[in-house]
Amino acid sequence: MNNMVLSLAPKFTKLRVLILRQDKPQLDDNAVETIAQNCHDLEDLDLSKSFKLGDRSLYALARGCPDLIKLNISGCSAFSDAALEYLSGYCRKLKILNLCGCVKAASDKALKAIGYNCRQLQSINLGWCEGVGDTGVMSLAYGCPDLRALDLCGCVLITDESVIALANNCLHLRSLGLYYCQNITDRAMYALAHSRVKNKREVWESVKSRYEEEGLINLNISQCTALTPPAVQALCDSCPALHTCPGRHSLIISGCLNLTSVHCACAFQAHRAVAPLSHRAH
Ligand SMILES: [Zn+2]
């Protein structure tokens, strides 16, 4: 694949989308440099699982592809945070960024730069980036008000402060992954529920679409063992698109044995539908 990219990239100078997902990593920095030197209009680049790539690739992309909107470098574990910081200064149009498993690159320092430079960011995956802490997530919350999806699965350091900052600043947040964030407590759930109420008021004023009113539509809190049923139920009540029922299952609570009493709106509707029938029977 590496040789193919080296020979083809100079011929496709108008390329906008390039997916180079690999099962066996073959791409090296020379190939990415050739892409960056020739494909200046690139908007969507997928380099996931390119374990061989080093910082040279990120520096080249920063200089050659300033129009990148979507970048997937998940699993590229060799990138440093200095290189990611540099890239964020040039690729300021980024909306979707997948950094899952970029343990070295996704530091609080790099996230601070992303929050400062990439204000249009809508989706960022920080799964299993164990170095990410509240400082980094709060920089994103303050810098990227349009954030809609954030995956913090396995970011074991983050606390309620991160979630509270997101709840207060990112009113379009629809999807949040907190799998295994075991410092998260009920305070975070109430902050999300409360932001929903605040947002509803603003939505009412500006008369937005029905979809805009639905709040969180995906939340993964499995293995967040400190959470209690009243807090999670309060959040579930204020976000009607969160479901615990089989089939829809958008509030994921597996591993939280004490949360089995939390139910989505469907459970109450089912109860209401059954109740009049049982009355008639008497
Ligand atoms: Zn449901």
Image: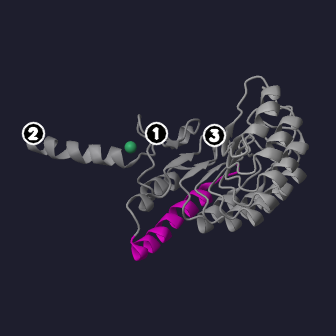
Q: Residues within 10 Å of mark 1 (few under 14, many from 20)?
A: some
Type of colouring: one colour
Predominant SS of the magenta segment: helix
Write down the region rendered in magenta. Answer: 183-207
Q: Residues within 10 Å of mark 2 (few under 14, many from 20)?
A: few
> Hey, what amino acid is under mark 1?
His
Residue 249's tag is 1
- Quadrant hosting ligand 1: top left
Q: CA distance from mark 2 to mark 1?
A: 33 Å
> Hey, what amino acid is under mark 2?
Ala
Give the quadrant of residue 118.
Answer: bottom right
Q: Which residue is mark 2?
A: 281
Q: Is residue 113 left or right of residue 190?
A: right
Q: Nearer the viewer, mark 2 or mark 3?
A: 3
Q: Earlier in the sequence, mark 3 or mark 1?
A: 3
Residue 223's tag is 3
